[in-house]
Amino acid sequence: MELEIYQVDSFTEQVFHGNPACVVPLKNWLPDETLLKIARENAVAETAFFIDKGDIIHLRWFTPEIEMDLCGHATLATAHCLVAHLSYQKNRIIFETQAGPLNVYIEDGVYYMDFPSRMPEPTALPDIIERSLNIKPKEVFKSRDYVLLYESEQDIINIRIDRSIFDLINLDPGGVVVTAAGTDSDFVSRFFTPQSSILEDPVTGSAHCSLIPFWAKRLTKDNLLALQLSERGGKLYCENKPDRVIIAGKARTYSVGRFWI
């Protein structure tokens, strides 16, 4: 079987930045085991598989280890693939996913993703996570992911993870996001996933389902600029709504190809 594949850098305006995702169009769903093997072979944080049903596009996301319940950067990559390479003519895309319907609006090369809001609540930090951090957070919250609040952007830059300890915990399908108020943005973050082949995710759209309502409440503003301070870096334009969040960014295609299974 011959399949098309697109690799897209999301939440950036230039290649080699943002978060890379692979996008694979399908006619019919392949066995989950095969989808997972393809994701492992691609060796990026997420591979998106979609089936175009006309008015609705069915979308699923796989890491090299598991199927995810929600992924922002691979959703953005899929929207970009449809518009830039597959002649999608509408300025609105409706994705049907495990997280429910996700709408993406396209305007002037920016993809606006309408995602569920996940306000994190105060909680205790598991001992394993605390011992794996070189800098302790000042407050701890949780929704799908643990959200660790720090004093400054410099703290976020300086955080190091002791993976030998960190990988003792399984947060499937969540991770740990560290965050602080930004100096040149409203807030900054980094995202880590224990027991994952890729420890630090370059840009994590789904984590902003929690970060956006969290910072909107703290900063008393609904329109926010976010930077993810990974080595590749990423920029996200954010809007807080009562039960939803808008996560927006740009994307660039890195490669287009074919593979055989």
Image (cartoon, rainbow, N blue to C red):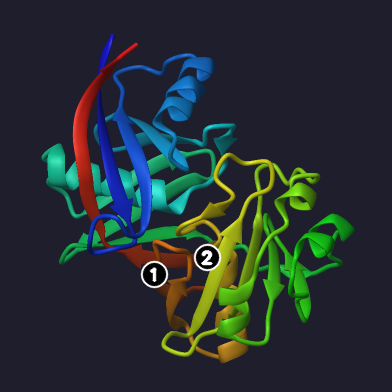
Asked if residue 52 shows in the view, the reply is no
Under circle 2, the secondary element is helix
Left or right of 66 in this view: 11:
left
- Disc 2 and disc 1: Cα gap in Å? 9 Å
Q: Quadrant of the C terminus?
A: top left
Asked if residue 81 shows in the view, the reply is yes
Residue type marked 1: Leu
Under circle 1, the secondary element is strand
Left or right of 79 in this view: 63:
right
Residue 247: x %, y % from top left: 41, 65
Local crowd at mark 1 within 10 Å, few (<14), some, or many (≥20)?
A: many
Residue at image point 51% right, 44% down: 100
Tell which of 247 and 191 is nearer to you. 191
Q: Residue 198 is drawn in which quadrant?
A: top right
Residue 39: x %, y % from top left: 45, 29
Residue at image point 67% right, 57% down: 145
Residue at image point 27% right, 59% down: 105
Asked if labels 1 and 2 touch by Cβ distance under 8 angstroms, the answer is: yes
Tell which of 63 and 132 is nearer to you. 132
Local crowd at mark 2 within 10 Å, few (<14), some, or many (≥20)?
A: many
Tell which of 233 and 251 is nearer to you. 233
Tell which of 80 and 7 is nearer to you. 7
Residue at image point 32% right, 64% down: 249
For disc 1, the marked residue is: 236
Left or right of 148 in this view: 191:
left
For disc 2, the marked residue is: 208
Q: Quadrant of the N terminus?
A: top left
Residue 245: x %, y % from top left: 48, 67
- Seen in the picture, residue 97 relative to 131 is either above or below; the reply is above
Residue 235: x %, y % from top left: 37, 70
Residue type marked 2: His
